[in-house]
Amino acid sequence: MRFYLTTPIYYVNATPHIGHAYTTIAADVLVRHHRQRGEETFFLTGTDEHASKVYRVAEQQGLDAKTYVDRIADDWRELPRRVNAQYDFFIRTTDEGHKRFVQEFLQRIYDNGDIYQDVYSGLYCIGCEEFKSESDLVDGLCPEHGIAPEHIEEKNYFFRLSAYQDRLLELYDERPDFVLPRFRYNEARSFIEGGLQDFSVSRAGQPWGVPIPWDQGQVTYVWVDALINYLSALTYAREGEDLRERFWPHVHHLIGKDILRFHCVYWPALLLSAGYEVPQQVFVHGYLLLDERKISKSLGNVIDPLDLVDVYGSDAVRFWALRSVSFGHDGSASVDALHERYERELANDLGNLVSRTTAMISRYGGGRIEPGPRNEELATALDALREKLVARFDAYDLTGGLEDIWEVVRLLNRQVEAKAPWQLAKDESKTDELAAVLYDLADGLRAVAVAVSPYIPETAPRILGTLRQPVDLALEQVTYGRTVDTDGIQPAQPLFPRVDLPTAAA
Ligand code: MSP
């Protein structure tokens, strides 16, 4: 099995914020999970650099566009690193390899007769980098960015999207899981049914972008340039290797709901025109809202995820983002909620369990663990967890996956209380029972560490290390009784130490 996952490529007109981190975190969790299943994975992220708004910001700063993007690209490379996302390639649309590929791709569409010249006269929202109709606006403003679109009139090259309506509808009929969740599939499908209009794939009078191969006076429309990154990257990410053979079309796009039309309608049509297979799946997630508002620069309501990572660590931020808001839907999150989850779920439910377990193994078991009779309740719970996780991840239900894992964490906490090892330790005739309880706690925690490792990849190996277990993160290890006999277990340091609620960020 092959699993190629992409994030959207981010506009570099400003620096990263928690909303961007959200997509990157979710993507990383997904890829790590598929790796646990033994699949061959590839994870692509990067930056979208040829936008008009990027060009304008550079102008405002008195820099030429390339100098500006080269400077800010480092901030964007830092984003995945700060949230501990392990990408395989970071694409920049200003890469020579990408630009060359965009031109080849456009030429194929042109040669297939799907491009013609016409005049575009209408509106353009520089926030969305999108041509708009009056019906897209609310009180004359773009509802997404709260700004008035500009009127433009230019001679452009148009793509015959209208010619692809039937083929797209066939695709949607044949592949009911082409777009997930279902309500997004319906949204995309009804947009197609409503009738498709040809759209401009070029911009005139702007020097910043990939030149149209047959007309050097025009550059490629930034959205077309950007979408093609998902393919172009595979042609030059690994020198001397064309990864398209391995990973196309096993591609899954993870996107926010604001960019659904581009990915679910325009992109498959462009691919069909250029003679490529369409992607396997598009998953559309909702917004992470802060104070009920979308977090974004233009609304001036920004929390820097890098600040939160500095205070709580990347695992806590990853956990909070996916636990607070049901993945796929919009939802509010706050710094208070992050703090609360950190204390209650990470430090208390999980961290304390590790501390208590290792302390008891050290104190009552001399640091040694050995299996006793099979704990049926735990064994059944772990088998169920393994199976549930596969189903959750196939449905991109990252929030549900965490709930399933936490059920086992709670089960282990209940077993500690019910079996009270500190009582057993007082009774010499209960030595075997005590040993079995300690083994089961260690084994359950080992399995939880493996299960939760995609979400909190820094902490999971630490738990395994504390239990003196090998760091084997294969999903099949979420099975009862895989703990290897060991001695020398010491009381663990707190996994999630106390943190004061940061007031500046709240
Ligand atoms: N450059 C385009 C994407 C091109 S992909 C071929 C773009 N960039 S963006 O930087 O504006 O947004 C990138 C992603 O971040 C989008 O999926 C968007 O939905 C996501 N998010 C930005 N703010 C967000 C939240 N507050 N919450 C969740 N995701 C949001 O669009």
Image (cartoon, helix red, strand yellow):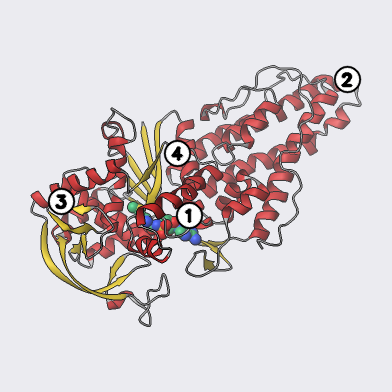
Q: Which mark is residue 429?
A: 2
> Residue 30: horizontal and vertical position, in percent?
47, 41
Q: Amino acid at mark 3?
A: Pro
Closer-to-camera residue (472/222): 222
Q: Amino acid at mark 1?
A: His
What is the residue that sits farthest to the bottom in this orientation? 139
Q: Amino acid at mark 2?
A: Ser
**Ligand 1 sits in quadrant:** bottom left
Mark 1 vs 2, N-terminal side: 1
The quadrant in which residue 199 appears is bottom left
State whether residue 206 is above or below residue 134: above
Q: Which mark is residue 213?
A: 3
Which residue is disc 4 drawn over? 87
CA gap, disc 3 and disc 4: 31 Å
The quadrant in which residue 337 appears is bottom right
Eye-nearest disc, 2 or 3: 3
Q: Which mark is residue 20?
A: 1
State whether residue 271 is above or below residue 291: above
